[in-house]
């Protein structure tokens, strides 16, 4: 058997599929190179439209209600860390390294890494110090120095970038509240020159925010280029698997914090010339719970028991049979407030079920307090919530017409509700027992110490 490859897992914030290789009109040559020389998964979805729960799924192969992070890690949710990817890889002889952001534990030393190279922050919070620590440029430079040193192989490197998370910029005097944008350290684009995704309104605040986020995307792309150059300089091209992904959609209305496709879509690129043919673009439905079993299948020819994901290796190996998913699942429980939602998506249909009443459509705090958020919640209003949504994605790609009450779709609704219910029971979803509260609910919400 060939020596197991080195593994570099690059993950960033709030990027979705906002990249040139995913048909966005933006120049991202380095990330696009990964797609051109490796595989770009066109239908990759995350297990949650929020940071910590989704990252927990990436590093455990489990859905959020199974790995423990039903909310953000810097609140009172805790990850069951004993079977995370670094621990599993250590068992197979890997030396494991953490660079930059991790955002799944308040105690990163418990995550199983042999060495932490930068002061990785937990929260993607607003302070310039936290931001500076995990800026893509700085993290990538540290990774490059590591790759050009005397390395012990095989190694695993988790590389986390802060970008493209919003920053608290300053209090807006006109509105009298905090504003979240993308900072002044990045050179974005002219708001009048960009295209607007079809799921967003073409309004000034949306344009201004989209133009600004592009500066962060360029920083991510430059950092990916730095790492690719370092891999080549170190002569590691043929013995390194590089993955590039994110945890959920961009931080805009109808994306982050929602189970609509723009909220749970995420880029997934895999580059490993020894195994993956250049330019592959698998269209299978895949989930980020599949990444851990894929890595372990590659290095040890086995998928561990008790994970929710499945290996993607058979997609690349003609001697193996890949059994594609019929559906993917995603969820949100807590994010800034209680907002329990579960969803199931097939190739054609999306069913969304809510389990708690909120008077208006949920917006995460950083989206709510943004220029784009103001366009939706203020001048143009926030729509009322409903408990059930069903979309025919073949006819309604952008999930605009809810057909849950349409008699013509009654059988589809019944089938998808059954799939969702079965999944919740098989995975012991705590929502089945009633409302889910954090372990330290009283201290957080009632001031009890």
Image (cartoon, grey):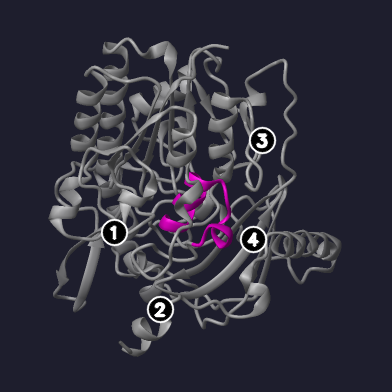
Nearer to us of marks 1 and 2 is: 2
Q: Secondary structure at mark 2?
A: loop
Q: What separation in Å lies between label 4 and label 3 (alpha carbons)?
A: 18 Å
Q: Which residue is mark 3?
A: 284
Q: Quarter-wise, where is residue 417 in the image?
A: bottom right
Segment tinted magenta in the rendering: 50-68
Q: Indicate which disc, 2 or 3, sits on the residue closer to the N terminus.
A: 3
Q: Which residue is mark 1?
A: 123
Indicate whether residue 173 is drawn in magenta.
no
Q: Which residue is mark 4?
A: 343
Nearer to us of marks 3 and 1 is: 1
How packed is label 2: few (under 14 Cα within 10 Å), some, or many (20 or more)?
A: few
Q: What separation in Å lies between label 1 and label 2 (alpha carbons)?
A: 18 Å
Q: Indicate which disc, 3 or 1, sits on the residue closer to the N terminus.
A: 1
Q: Which residue is mark 2?
A: 440
- Between 51 and 59, the one lying in front of the other is 59
């Amino acid at each position: 058997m060939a020596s197991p490859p080195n593994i570099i897992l690059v993950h960033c914030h709030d990027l979705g599929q906002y990249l040139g290789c995913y048909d966005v009109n933006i120049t991202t040559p380095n990330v696009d190179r990964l797609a051109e020389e490796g595989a770009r998964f066109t239908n990759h979805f995350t297990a949650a439209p929020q940071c910590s729960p989704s990252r927990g799924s990436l590093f455990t192969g489990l859905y959020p209600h199974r790995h423990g992070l039903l909310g953000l890690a810097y609140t009172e949710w805790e990850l069951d860390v004993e079977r995370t990817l670094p621990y599993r890889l250590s068992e197979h002889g890997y030396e494991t390294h953490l660079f930059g952001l991790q955002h799944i534990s308040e105690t990163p030393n418990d995550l199983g890494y042999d060495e932490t190279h930068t002061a990785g922050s937990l929260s993607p919070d607003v302070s310039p110090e936290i931001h500076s620590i995990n800026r893509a440029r700085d993290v990538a430079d540290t990774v490059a120095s590591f790759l050009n040193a005397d390395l012990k192989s095989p190694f695993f490197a988790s590389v986390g970038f802060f970008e493209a998370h919003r920053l608290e910029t300053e209090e807006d005097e006109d509105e009298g509240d905090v504003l979240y944008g993308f900072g002044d350290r990045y050179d974005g684009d002219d708001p009048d020159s960009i295209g607007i995704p079809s799921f967003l309104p073409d309004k000034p605040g949306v344009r201004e925010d989209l133009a600004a986020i592009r500066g962060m995307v360029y920083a991510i792309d430059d950092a990916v280029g730095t790492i690719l150059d370092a891999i080549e300089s170190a002569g590691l091209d043929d013995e390194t698997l590089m993955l590039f992904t994110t945890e959920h959609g961009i931080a805009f209305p109808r994306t982050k914090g929602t189970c609509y496709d723009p909220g749970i879509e995420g880029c997934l690129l895999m580059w490993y010339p020894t195994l993956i043919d250049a330019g592959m673009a698998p269209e299978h439905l895949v989930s980020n719970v599949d990444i851990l079993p894929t890595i372990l299948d590659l290095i040890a020819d086995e998928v561990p028991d008790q994970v929710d994901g499945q290996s993607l290796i058979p997609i690349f190996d003609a001697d193996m049979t890949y059994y594609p998913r019929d559906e993917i699942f995603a969820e949100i429980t807590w994010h800034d407030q209680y907002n329990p939602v579960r969803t199931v998506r097939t190739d054609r249909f999306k069913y969304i079920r809510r389990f708690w009443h909120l008077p208006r459509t949920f917006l995460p705090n950083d989206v709510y307090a943004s220029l784009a958020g103001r366009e939706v919640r203020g001048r143009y209003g926030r729509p009322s919530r409903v408990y059930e949504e069903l979309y025919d994605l073949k006819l309604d790609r952008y999930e605009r017409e809810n057909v849950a009450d349409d008699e013509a779709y009654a059988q589809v609704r019944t089938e998808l509700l059954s799939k969702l219910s079965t999944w919740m029971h098989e995975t012991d979803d705590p929502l089945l027992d009633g409302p889910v509260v954090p372990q330290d609910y009283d201290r957080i919400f009632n001031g009890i110490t």
